[in-house]
Amino acid sequence: MNFQIKALPPEPFEPLFKMSDAELLARNIVKTTVQEANSTPCRVSLTDAKIGATVLLLNYQHLKEETPFQASHAIFVSQAVEQAYPEKGTVPEVIHSRVVSIRAFDSQHMMVQADIAQGLQVAEKIQLMFSDQGVEYLHLHYAKQGCYIGEVTRC
């Protein structure tokens, strides 16, 4: 069964990079420069931002539907990057290089399964969860920090 991991589009974040630090802070957003390799996974490019790159750390509501599981969490977004379009059935390095929480939701946006995985297990567990026809979509999170990565759909 094929699946597709969806990165966030850059357009909603682009105007934020033009704001002053004070304007960003008023919105609980922090603009920073990456100091350490493999420390800042961008949700638009689905890569680790490079040392010296400008990124925003902001709260992102990734489950907006009216459900007890409505949720938001911190994410990093890099400046001036293109949206990633991973190949069907593939997991980008930035994801499978970390421990990932995989959460399965039904059509009513209720969590029906959850698990953790790393490396090649990520794709295996995604496929296993989608073998349940009651699963509508998945959300991926970095397990240690709890940060949202992206949505996974069947294709």
Image (cartoon, rainbow, N blue to C red):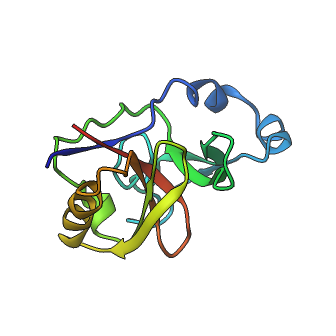
Numbered circles on residues, count? 0
Q: Is residue 67 left or right of residue 4?
A: right
Quadrant showing the C terminus = top left
In this orientation, which residue lies closer to the viewer: 48 or 110? 110
Q: Residue at x 15, y 45 (%)?
A: 2
Q: Is residue 73 left or right of residue 151?
A: right
Q: Residue at x 36, y 31 (%)?
A: 82
Q: Residue at x 55, y 53 (%)?
A: 110
Is residue 39 in view from this perspective? no
In this orientation, which residue lies closer to the viewer: 48 or 152? 152
Please state the horizontal and vertical placement of residue 100, each as a whole percent of the image.
39, 69
In this orientation, which residue lies closer to the viewer: 68 or 87? 68
Please state the horizontal and vertical placement of residue 33, each as a whole percent of the image.
56, 52
In this orientation, which residue lies closer to the viewer: 15 or 117? 117
Please state the horizontal and vertical placement of residue 69, each as a whole percent of the image.
63, 55
Is residue 51 in view from this perspective? yes
Quadrant position of residue 132? bottom left
Please state the horizontal and vertical placement of residue 22, each as a whole percent of the image.
84, 39
Q: Residue at x 24, y 59 (%)?
A: 93
Quadrant position of residue 85? top left
